Amino acid sequence: MPKGKKAKGKKVAPAPAVVKKQEAKKVVNPLFEKRPKNFGIGQDIQPKRDLTRFVKWPRYIRLQRQRAILYKRLKVPPAINQFTQALDRQTATQLLKLAHKYRPETKQEKKQRLLARAEKKAAGKGDVPSKRPPVLRAGVNSVTTLVENKKAQLVVIAHDVDPIELVVFLPALCRKMGVPYCIIKGKARLGRLVHRKTCTTVAFTHVNPEDKGALAKLVEAIRTNYNDRYDEVRSALHKILSCANLFPKQLAGLTHEQLYLAINLEQPNRTTQLITLKISENRLS
């Protein structure tokens, strides 16, 4: 029997080719040659970027930044914390204005005074020693001796003494001996009063009669703010653990109970409750 022919399928016409849109060729000016930059090592100049993280800061800057972070992270002891409670600007200005009148003489002034005294003696007018004028007494040792002998009328301590152990005992000593004291911002400001770069503490011993009223007003204000509020000033902020300054990993490791106890005082106020709620919201979000 003859074999049947296989049925051949119809050839399907191929799909018409997609008509490609002819893109307009960009006209290249032969006068300007393209020179792409190579930012590899040793090649083109690198683009400007923020190099703050790459800077090796001086040692004193690193130390003061680390110290500031530690003060924020740790609970500061009361004896050290009191040095954050400095005198207000208005009272400090009045105090410095009064202290400026009692600056000790410079080396040049002393030389001129002794020279004038020697000339009088050489002229046969006799050697009459002049009375020592009232001046500021500077330095920890001198001021401590004056306080112990109750000869100091007012003690002024710098807030940024380093190391702080040099003057940390002075407020307690002044309170015990009944001598008014205050803490002022800037050991450099005190240094300018006594012709030095810096000074830890100065003391008033005597003033002229015309300045006794001004000194009495200052002593009254300072005694109210420091001597009478000694315990309050010492313990003002040392119990607060500022959770707003903790690292994210430290915050994540705290439970809600620990978080509340860490920033809540014995008598919780509205501010600490708001901080607790704010941090809790951030952690839950």
Image (tube, helix red, strand yellow):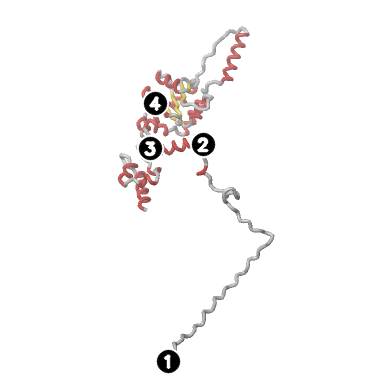
Q: CA distance from mark 1 to mark 3?
A: 105 Å
**Element under label 4?**
loop
* Image location of residue 80, percent across then percent down: 39, 31
For mark 3, what is the residue? Answer: 74
Cβ atoms under marks 1 and 3 closer than 8 Å: no
Toward the front, the furthest residue is: 1
Q: Between 209 and 175, which is closer to the camera in this rendering?
A: 175
Q: Which quarter of the picture shows residue 126?
A: top right
Sequence-wise first label, 1 or 3: 1
Q: Nearer the viewer, mark 3 or mark 2?
A: 2
For mark 4, what is the residue? Answer: 169
Residue kind at label 1, given as amino acid type = Pro
Q: CA distance from mark 3 to mark 4?
A: 21 Å
Residue kind at label 4, given as amino acid type = Phe
**Which class describes the residues within 10 Å of circle 2: few (<14), some (14-19), or many (20+)?**
few
**Element under label 2?**
loop
Cβ atoms under marks 3 and 2 closer than 8 Å: no
Q: Nearer the viewer, mark 1 or mark 3?
A: 1
Sequence-wise first label, 3 or 2: 2
